[in-house]
Amino acid sequence: MNEHLVILDFGSQYTQVIARRIRECNVYSTIVPFGAPAKEIAASKPSGLILSGGPASVYAPKAPMPDQGIFTLGIPVLGICYGVQLFAHFLGGKVERGQKREYGKGTLTVKDLTCALFRNLPGTLQVWNSHGDQLTDLPPGFAPVATTENSAYAVIEHHEKKFFGLQFHPEVAHTPRGREILANFVHGICRCGRNWTMRHYLEQAVEVVRAQVGKERVILGLSGGVDSSVAAALIHRAIGDHLTCIFVNNGLLRAREPETVRQVFGRNFQLKLQCEEASKLFLARLRHVSDPERKRKIIGRTFIEVFQTATRRAGKAKFLAQGTLYPDVIESVPIAGNPAALIKSHHNVGGLPKRMKFELVEPLKCLFKDEVRQLGLELGLPREIVYRQPFPGPGLGVRILGEVTPDRCALLRKADTIVVEEMKTSGWYYKLWQSFAVLLPVRTVGVMGDERTYDYTIAIRAVESQDGMTADWVKLPYDLLEKLANRIINEVKGVNRCVFDITSKPPGTIEWE
């Protein structure tokens, strides 16, 4: 394996952010469970090791503990928050509950600017803290490097062993120079180059898929979204006509979605594409259903039923491909005992019935969303596909509040098309994580052409986010909002009012259902 860093996950919700920051240094990083045997870690020949933060206290009875052998691997180690406390716990120091907790912004004062972590950085830095425990005695061989208002040992170093500990979180955006600190560890201390690129990953991924699949056939559920599209293009490059893509029209898709998929993949990429028309079936099963969770379950079950029938028509295949991403895996299941809390379930992780006897091919499961987009460009996918905004698996079914009907689908589809058109024309579409229309189960009185109306309300949602885990509403220009409202009300029959959603995540979610 080429140069890479291993991250031991102790349950921090920021662990995957650490991985992202290392990859931004053009060095591959991988997250492994906190208890991974030191021998297994050594076998992969990492250039360095990072110990993540976590919610536990090292002195707690059931605190997650690593294999002590990680401290004898002879490679640089960086401990972050809980990770730095592990140095004290295992190597002879002491950790106690702090008299004052440190949460949020703090000021780091670097006492020893010769420390390699702070190369080309000033002596005073803004950092972000999130801890209640602190080091009170350093292990033998360690020296203090920096302090914060409440931590005498905010940064520590064992110069000979190249062990470094940070009580704050360098990976988060609230530590503005944190990326430089991590880059100093990756390049200056671990001596890694800048060799990991999407082109390099593509070459490796193609070989991995070929080795896994051999001469067997693969089936992939193609939705037209970024993830499944990139997975389809990658696997097709690896095995050609041994891949069959199945596209299911559930009647809840964006405007012209079936035509776009046929054009891009059937004609341009010349993939084997099997299109299933199931709109009537989905909409019939959603009749009189208003509860959002019931809608999701009905859509999910029906999709599996339709997809399973379609796979039989497609012919015998050993493998099923999915566009599962790294955040999907991390958020959906505790990885091999990882103490992190379960955040949410994803439709493409562990959702297949046992009777579908496929082995999985998941070529994107080690990538984040922005990396998948880069990979899509390397594969030659159109920018309109690669940079399209995320679309929920249940489609318009969770953007129509209340009962889903053909008429309401048509109404929302027209409104959403206007939102997409105007966001692209104004240049805002590719700046945001998502922007879309929601049909509310609210009818209001209006006046159009001197006549009374009693029609539906459309909510416009626009959010910015890095990964969808948190999001903030976007302050769109008033003239753009005015144009959106005017077009929707004038062009979409059945709508007489528009509202703008100014809720962040949390406390809300990005989608309304």
Image (tube, helix red, strand yellow):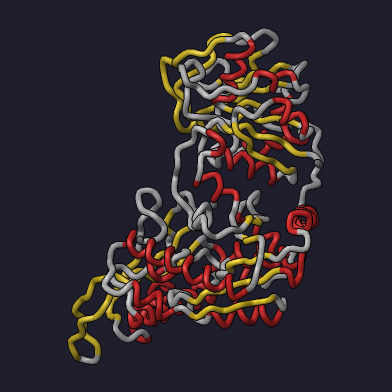
Left or right of 48 on screen, residue 461: left
Query: Of 98 and 397, which appears nearest the observer?
Result: 397
Asked whether 200 or 219 is in front, the reply is 219
Q: Quick one: quadrant of the N terminus? A: top right
x and y percent of residue 495 in the render? Answer: 30, 80
Is residue 41 found left or right of 360 in the rendered image? right
What's the residue at 36%, 61% (across, down)?
512
Q: Residue at x 50, y 78 (%)?
A: 421
Where residue 96 sits: x, y (%)?
Answer: 48, 13
Instruction: List x then y, in percent, for residue 461.
Output: 40, 65
Q: Can residue 224 be seen in this view?
A: no
Q: At x 62% / y 25%, what residue is drawn?
A: 79
Horizontal and vertical percent position of residue 230: 66, 64
Residue 433 visible, this angle? yes
Instruction: Count the labels in the image.
Output: 0
Q: In this view, does 16 lie above or below 34?
A: below
Query: In the rendered image, which quarter is residue 20 located in?
Result: top right
* Identity of the residue drawn at 34% across and 59% down: 293
| Relative to 288, residue 14 above or below | above
